């Protein structure tokens, strides 16, 4: 397994251990269960939607970790609409929750509602995706992956995939982008292009690139159009497994062999992605860990108690080539 470890920063790890130990010493009760004064900590959480297997696993992780911590969780699914997330955050402010956490569907358009949370003295924690803001004080920390690094990793593992396939000559790449304006879409494209421009200026070219909105239906529909306009594509780089799985259906409908006629690299590492890889239809997967719940709950408690936390708490992630899929499948947790 190609392992690339992005560490939970040591400071948070130490603080987490110290903080939890101290609370346990005081009252012997589970330290996560109250926001002080015996009342259970209340967390308002706005989720992007339910667009992919990654999102489903992420929601389950948040819900089970909140239950485990003894928190009262208010959870809303925005169906990938920013306006729904903004109204959910406003509701949490009105309900005077202890902490607000959310995964912003896109990077822009949050300052107004985050200023309202700040005025209400409710701390905000970002999870999974980040935002662009002129005022750093509008959120305390981000618990999530480095998507630009995932893009670089995708390009680096594509080098291995091309070598294994014995590919010679120019590489014509189709790119299925995530949701337009979303941090993972912007940054996975950026990281991939960084490596391509630095190391493959003369032989790699992204001949077509369009959003499939992180869904299987989107991946299938856009890949079918790609194959119409660019029948000589050698490689598909999909920003998530679900779009890659949808694209596989389009590639097979066009009479081509996914994983052979068109080499495929995707990001996430959900179970269905590993199944497709074990069937030889995906050539490599860059993992993006959705199981952020436990880290999020640790941070939420520290933020509620006014403890210092790191500005960005990264997750552990690995990369997998096709010949590792079968062995890895039984160990996959999502
Ligand atoms: C990445 C996450 C992305 C996943 C997609 O952290 O925001 O959104 O890669 C999901 O599967 O839809």
Image (spheres, rainbow, N blue to C red):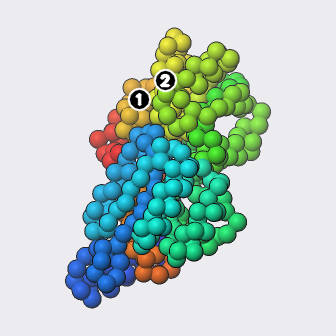
Nearer the observer, 220 or 194: 220
x then y, percent, for residue 12: 46, 74
Q: Say which mark, if any, is on residue 276.
A: 1
- Left or right of 75: which side holds 284? right
Whole-Å distance between the Cαs marked 1 and 2? 9 Å
Whether residue 186 is visible to the viewer of this picture, yes or no, is yes
Are the residues flagged by discs 1 and 2 in contact, CB closer than 8 Å? yes
Report which quarter residue 170 is drawn in: top right
Of marks 1 and 2, which one's residue comes earlier in the chain? 2
Residue 40 falls left or right of residue 265: left
List the residue tagged with mark 2.
248
The answer to whether residue 171 of the structure is visible from this angle is no
Q: Is residue 180 above or below residue 65?
A: above
Secondary structure, mark 1, is helix
At horizontal 46% and vertical 61% (from top left) the residue drawn is: 91
In the drawing, does residue 214 fall left or right of residue 14?
right
Question: What count of labels does the image hold?
Answer: 2
Label 1 CA crowd tier, 10 Å (few <14, some 14–19, many 20+)? many
Q: What element does badge 2 sit on? A: helix
Establish whether ligand 1 lies closer than 8 Å to the Cβ of label 1. no
Between 116 and 159, the one lying in front of the other is: 116
**Ligand 1 has an atom within 8 Å of the beta carbon of the residue at disc 2:** no
Q: What is the x, y in percent for residue 157?
A: 56, 40
Residue at image point 51% right, 62% down: 90
Residue 321 as seen in the image, left or right of residue 207: left
Whether residue 5 is situated above or below residue 280 in the rendered picture: below
Above or below, 325 relative to 91: above
Between 278 and 79, which is closer to the camera in this rendering? 79
Say which of marks 1 and 2 sits in front. 2
Residue at 57%, 73% (x, y): give it.
118
Quadrant of the snapshot with the C terminus: top left
């Amino acid at each position: 397994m190609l392992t690339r470890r992005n560490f939970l920063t040591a400071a948070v790890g130490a603080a987490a251990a110290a903080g939890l130990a101290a609370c346990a010493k005081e009252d012997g009760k589970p330290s996560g269960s109250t926001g002080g004064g015996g009342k259970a900590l209340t967390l308002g959480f706005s989720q992007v939607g339910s667009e992919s297997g990654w999102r489903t696993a992420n929601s389950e992780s948040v819900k089970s970790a909140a239950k485990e911590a003894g928190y009262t969780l208010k959870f809303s699914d925005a169906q990938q609409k920013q306006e729904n997330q903004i109204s959910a955050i406003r509701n949490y402010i009105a309900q005077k929750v202890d902490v607000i956490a959310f995964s912003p569907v896109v990077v822009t358009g949050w300052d107004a509602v985050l200023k309202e949370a700040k005025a209400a003295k409710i701390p905000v924690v970002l999870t999974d995706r980040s935002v662009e803001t002129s005022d750093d004080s509008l959120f305390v920390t981000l618990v999530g992956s480095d998507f630009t690094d995932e893009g670089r990793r995708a390009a680096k593992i594509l080098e291995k995939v091309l070598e294994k396939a014995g590919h010679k000559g120019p590489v014509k790449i189709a790119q299925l982008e995530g949701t337009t304006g979303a941090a993972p879409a912007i940054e996975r494209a950026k990281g991939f292009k960084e490596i391509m421009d630095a190391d493959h200026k003369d032989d790699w070219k992204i001949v077509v690139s369009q959003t499939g909105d992180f869904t299987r239906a989107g991946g299938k529909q856009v890949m079918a159009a790609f194959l119409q306009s660019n029948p000589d594509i050698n490689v598909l780089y999909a920003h998530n497994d679900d779009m890659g799985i949808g694209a596989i259906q389009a590639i097979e409908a066009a009479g081509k062999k996914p994983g052979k006629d068109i080499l495929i690299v995707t990001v996430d590492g959900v179970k269905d992605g590993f199944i497709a890889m074990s069937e030889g239809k995906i050539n490599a997967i860059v993992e993006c860990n959705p199981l952020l719940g436990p880290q999020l709950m640790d941070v939420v408690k520290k933020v509620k108690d006014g403890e210092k936390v790191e500005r960005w708490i990264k997750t552990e992630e690995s990369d997998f080539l096709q010949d590792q899929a079968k062995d890895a499948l039984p160990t996959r947790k999502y």
